[in-house]
Amino acid sequence: MESVNQLLASIQDVGRDAVRGGYSRAVYTTPEHDLRQWFIEQAAQRGLEVETDRNGIIWAWWGKPQKGALVTGSHLDSVPGGGAFDGPLGVASALAAVDILKARGVQPARSLAVTVFPEEEGSRFGVACLGSRLLTGAIDVHKALNLRDINGDSFADVASANGLDPRYIGPDPEAMARIGEFVELHVEQGKGLGQDGPAVAVGSSILGHGRWKISISGQGNHAGTTLMTDRADPMVAAAQIIVAVRDTAATQPDARATVGRLTPVPGGTNVIASRVDLWLDARHPDDAVTAHLIERIYGTAQDIAAAEGCSVTLTEESYSDTVHFDTDLSRRITGLLPGAPVLATGAGHDAGVLAGYVPSAMVFVRNPSGISHSPEEYVADEDASAGAIALADVVEGLL
Ligand code: HGY
Ligand code: MN
Ligand code: MN
Ligand code: MN
């Protein structure tokens, strides 16, 4: 029996990114494969029956796989240069909670499954929560299979190389029927829990959030022979559009808009780019406001591009409506965690996708700085332990 902190320590060197810092554990790359193997071994050591479903979701069963089970889990993939806790904390806490319940002599009245969802971050194929979206049917399978990573490899090919059969990837009603309720424990990606006081909180909502690709086309040319007056430089347009994204979001309280990724084509130091692709992440509690923001950003981008002699397109890559967890399940969990505050989150989660189909809830564990998607993400040992005990209390109370 290992504590949640020992479990996390046992994977602390998997997928370290020497260039970016933190961890880079993109789905179906070696580090994430190694973490999946770690999970399977840890589950087997606890006598859990492990299976991987048609969408690559791993299910570790305490009791036989059955309809209406209690399911808890999270993800093991990360953003590039991500923290140690986003995802793995939920998985390690679930394993530790099984240990705690066994030590308490709990005999589950129904089966419990610990799950690991692939591609929660969407870091490789661009769509967040791809595994849970496939499971539930929340994404068109044809679109999913044709998603491509930065090397141009399709999800279908990569999934196939990792043991899945693309012919069967997609909605899985049988697996869905097995989820009576889903609870995800996750590091808090914010400072709602502050520096002291309760170490855990119950989730109330997830901001609606989406991803859009903005492509700006200009005239590729030689950096040394093209006069400044003869240019249609998409990088210059991109720079102005990024500032316009910030300025537009700033007009809406509680809006968040980010350009975290930009790719000039061809990307040579002595080359005026012919095209620049940038990716926009925008979020707001009111889905209509987000839609309005995107409209305004696109209109401004078109004006900027035209002024630079360029053209611009915007395509939506994924969108998740705002999720409200104010359900009977969350109220029961709040009752099982006396004193735990109820917090909204701006981060997306598989629990948010599943909430559209089965009773789902979230439990957050304190992250003193609130920083996440960064090597600086941190959870103190005592808070991680409190989180695992809280998850054990919730699972015991719901079983
Ligand atoms: O982007 C998100 O909100 C989540 O971390 N995938
Ligand atoms: Mn996460
Ligand atoms: Mn994340
Ligand atoms: Mn030359």
Image (cartoon, rainbow, N blue to C red):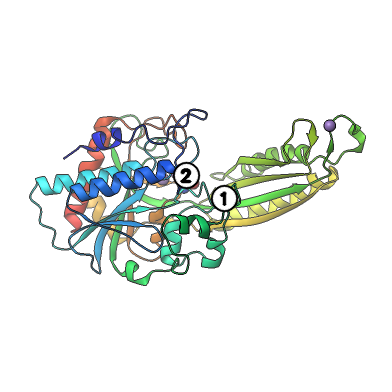
Q: Is residue 134 above or below residue 127?
A: below
Residue at mark 2 to residue at mark 1: CA–CA distance: 10 Å
Q: With 105 as the anchor, is 390 left or right in this view?
A: right
The quarter of the picture where residue 220 lies is top right
**Badge 1, how many Cα within 10 Å: few under 14, some, many 20+?**
some
Residue drawn where x is 74% and y is 34% of the image: 268
Residue type highlighted by circle 2 = Ala
**Badge 2, how many Cα within 10 Å: few under 14, some, many 20+?**
many
Which residue, given by chain and number where applicable, does mark 2 sit on?
26
The secondary structure type at the circle numbered 1 is: loop
Residue drawn where x is 24% and y is 34% of the image: 6
The quarter of the picture where residue 356 lies is bottom left
Residue type highlighted by circle 1 = Asp
* Label 2 near ligand 3 (CB < 8 Å): no
Q: Is residue 16 above or below residue 152?
A: above
**Residue furthest left in the image:** 105
Q: Nearer the viewer, residue 366 or 344?
A: 366
Q: Earlier in the sequence, mark 2 or mark 1?
A: 2
Q: Nearer the viewer, residue 192 or 115?
A: 115
Q: With 48 as the anchor, is 265 left or right in this view?
A: right
Q: Is residue 100 visible?
A: yes
Q: Given contact means CB atoms under 8 Å apart, are the residues at marks 2 and 1 in contact?
A: yes
Which residue, given by chain and number where applicable, does mark 1 sit on?
149
Q: Nearer the viewer, residue 220 or 164?
A: 164
Tell me where residue 24 appears, x and y as whole percent: 46, 38
